[in-house]
Image (spheres, rainbow, N blue to C red):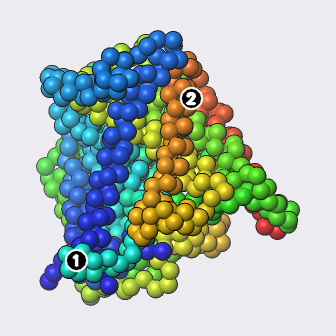
Amino acid sequence: MGKDVFEITVNILKMFVIFLMMVQAVPILVWLERRGSAFIQNRLGPNRVGPLGLLQLAADAVKFLFKEEFVPRQGVRFMYFFAPIMAMIPGALSFASLPLSVPIKIEPFQMLGQMWGPYTFAFQGYDLGIGIVFVLGISSLGVYSLLMAGWGSSNKYSLMGAVRASAQAISYELALSLSLVGILIVYGTFSFNEIVAAQTGPLTFRAFGAEHVISWLPNWGVFYQPLGAILFFSATFAEANRLPFDLPEAEGELVAGFHTEYAGFKLLMFFIGEYGHMMVASALLATFYLGGYNIPGVMPEDVLAFWQGVVGGNLASILTAVTFHLSLLLRIALLLWIFIQVRWTLPRFRYDQLMNLGWKSMLPWALFNVCVTALWVWFGHK
Amino acid sequence: MPTSAVVVDSISSVGLNHYLILSAILFSLGVVGVLMRRNIIVILMSIELMLNAVNIAFVAFSRYLQNMDGQAMVFFVMTIAAAEAAVGLALATTIFKKFREVNIRYFEHLKG
Amino acid sequence: MSLSLNDILFYFLAGVAVLSALGVILQSNPIYCALSLALTMVSVAGLFASLSAWFVAGVQLIVYAGAVLVLFVMVLMLFDTKTEKRAFSKGIVSGFFKIVSAAMIFAIAGGAASMSGDARFSKLTGVVSATQSTKDLADLLFKKYLFSFEAMGALLLFIAIGAVALSRIQGGTHAD
């Protein structure tokens, strides 16, 4: 029993759609960032091109495409051109491994004079059993983009930005991974799907041999791991090089950091990488701590039954998946707005403050979180 | 749960020997690097290359014997490699601070 | 002999690994060496995944490609040695013997591997899911190899202290 043409085609198309979702979210995010920052700073922001200034993005994209291509004279051509491409890879690969909604079940149907069998399409690019390890590993490769940009540009500001970026990424990766260890201990799995499945229903936890159910709270990870959630969210700011951790591109000191020498579409690709990182971070946070695509109090079967009452057959299954996908997107959008709001509200750290925070504050707290979680699980299961 | 069934269970002509020969190639390239290069950091990188070659052999044997011990060994090798890199880079930094170069011939001046 | 998907994957990853390993030992700019080594590490992680050692593959990406090599590149960028004047060791005769000795190591190892008959991978028995194999690995590490594992932790602590002590000679971690 192999996979037939239809299934393979759909799976390949799925990858494209997920990649395009990530890329297409970037213009919207840029618009949101500009309008949002204007709103926070009591300005108007771009509001001339199109309704609400939404077409500003199209204008920007066209402008970016027509910019002059250039390489710094003493730069390294290969690294200079490869760095923006490398910036997009980790975000795209990680985003494709996240479950975005419930699987779509397709009943057998007739097409081109042939029966096409029942299918189940997972609403995710690919399902790796070791999802968390994969995402951590892939996103740790993102530093190479910054390093290559810094070295390839042959500019001291770029180089200093790149070195800062790599030091920062190594430091905060520890806190990031350790804050996830709590989640691993609680759920006992690396798979995103199993973590999301474990977060259905009302809040249930075991403590001192008894089981407690709090019916008015959803069974989300944030109630098991509040400290872990805070640490994870803070560390993702540093990993995505966003303010208050944007030392790699601190424009007061380093002109524009590692992308000083970049312009036009290559700069846009760095932005896609950065916003992709933000999206992956938000989606991970939603998956680990905010119940993934689950809707509190509603089971997938209920939604499926509701849609089957409205439209029958395969469309109901697709609409169910879309409903749950919107529920995940809502969370991602909220978290992305927090990213933007923080950027335009908080001032930037000094570099030694950044390192102190990472090594002397977040790392011990993450270790403390791991110990407390392990003890809690140990006593809970006794 | 089918986890990436494509690479797990297909009939293939690649066997244990292929992985072992690849491991041997990478290991001897690492040996050449250690013997021929003068830059301490590149020598360290060649050692990492050799350790990686050993890891490939461990994992291939673990897969062949269907025994997880080989993968546990890989963990120890990785730990050793990380430790070695940390100390080696610290030494390289010390040498660079003294001589403004990271050549292996300055190692003999480090004593005392 | 027809090539299955698994074979194509193996030959591709092995080719990338060998070519980038050649890059490590042949390029004269240390930064390029480090980036080639990163490529080797990534393809070795892919090889681990093709042997269905999923967790080890992920750890390879995180530890080697993500942390150790970034450290190398960072140190190299701090040193700012563009190209070395003498990247390779002197002496044609000694160089010849060095290469010959490496070739002999390869001949012994590769010969032993290829003479050992046609060893095929049998189908994985039992559960092949990544979560289960990771649990088995954890069982081994925390039961059978518990002492070695804890000793590794102690080693890492000593190494960390030693590295800090080494780099604090003559004040501070910065050159000059």
The answer to whether any part of residue A204 appears in the image is: yes
Number of disc labels? 2
In the rendered image, residues at marks 1 and 2 fall on the same chain: no
Q: Position of residue A365 (x, y in %)?
A: 69, 40
Q: Residue at x 24, y 74 (%)?
A: A111
Q: Amino acid at mark 1?
A: Ser
Q: Which residue is mark 2?
A: A355
Q: Is residue A90 left or right of residue A224?
A: left
Query: What chain does badge 2 belong to?
Result: A
Q: Residue at x 52, y 49 (%)?
A: A328
Towards the viewer: C22 or A284 = A284
Callout 1 crowding tier (Cα within 10 Å): few <14, some 14–19, many ≥20? some
Towards the viewer: B31 or C92 = B31
Query: Does residue B52 lie above or below B36 as drawn?
Result: below
Query: Does residue A145 lie above or below A193 as drawn?
Result: above
Q: Position of residue C148 (x, y in %)?
A: 61, 65
Query: What chain does badge 1 belong to?
Result: C
**In the drawing, what numbered circle is on residue C4?**
1
Q: Give residue A144's quadrant in the image.
A: top left
Which of the two marks, 1 or 2, is nearer to us in this view? 1
Q: Amino acid at mark 2?
A: Met
Q: Residue at x 39, y 54 (%)?
A: A96
